Amino acid sequence: MAGDEKAKSKVEQAKGKVKKTAGRAVGNESKEAEGRGEKAKGDARQAKEKIKDVFKD
């Protein structure tokens, strides 16, 4: 399960980065903000998984 969550976080981060970049390229502030939020959500999910790994032992 943990590997699945880690993969989800990486996908979420990548999608967020693409949306942010695309939004910036076309001047769409809404899409850029959506991308930043999605990337942050992926970052938070990744941090949660790293914390779980630390306390696993």
Image (cartoon, rainbow, N blue to C red):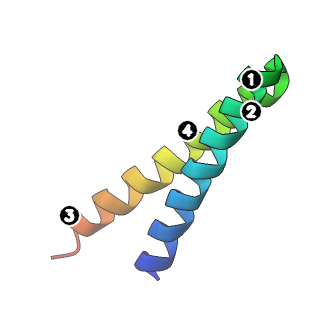
Residue at image mark 3: 54
Mark nearest the camera among 2 and 4 is: 2
At numbered mark 3, what does the secondary structure look like: helix, strand or loop? helix
Find the residue positioned furthest to the front: 25
Q: Are marks 2 and 4 in contact (CB under 8 Å)?
A: no
Q: Is residue 49 above or below residue 24?
A: below
At numbered mark 2, what does the secondary structure look like: helix, strand or loop? helix
In 3D space, how far apart are the residues under numbered discs 3 and 2 (Cα atoms)? 36 Å
Residue 40: which disc?
A: 4
Decide if residue 19 is on the left or right side of residue 55. right
Q: 10 Å neighbourhood of mark 4: few (<14), some, or many (≥20)?
A: some
Q: Is residue 37 above or below residue 51?
A: above
In 3D space, how far apart are the residues under numbered discs 3 and 1 (Cα atoms)? 39 Å
**Three-letter code, disc 1:** Ala
**Three-letter code, disc 3:** Val
Q: Earlier in the sequence, mark 4 or mark 1?
A: 1
Of 21 and 54, the residue lying toward us: 21
Rendering coords of residue 15 (x, y %): 66, 50
Residue drawn where x is 73% and y is 25% of the image: 33
Q: 10 Å neighbourhood of mark 2: few (<14), some, or many (≥20)?
A: some
Q: 10 Å neighbourhood of mark 1: few (<14), some, or many (≥20)?
A: few
Rendering coords of residue 32 (x, y %): 73, 26
Q: Are marks 3 and 2 in contact (CB under 8 Å)?
A: no
Residue at image mark 2: 22
Of 21 and 32, the residue lying toward us: 21
In 3D space, how far apart are the residues under numbered discs 4 and 3 (Cα atoms)? 21 Å
Residue at image mark 1: 25
In 3D space, how far apart are the residues under numbered discs 4 and 1 (Cα atoms)? 20 Å
At numbered mark 4, what does the secondary structure look like: helix, strand or loop? helix
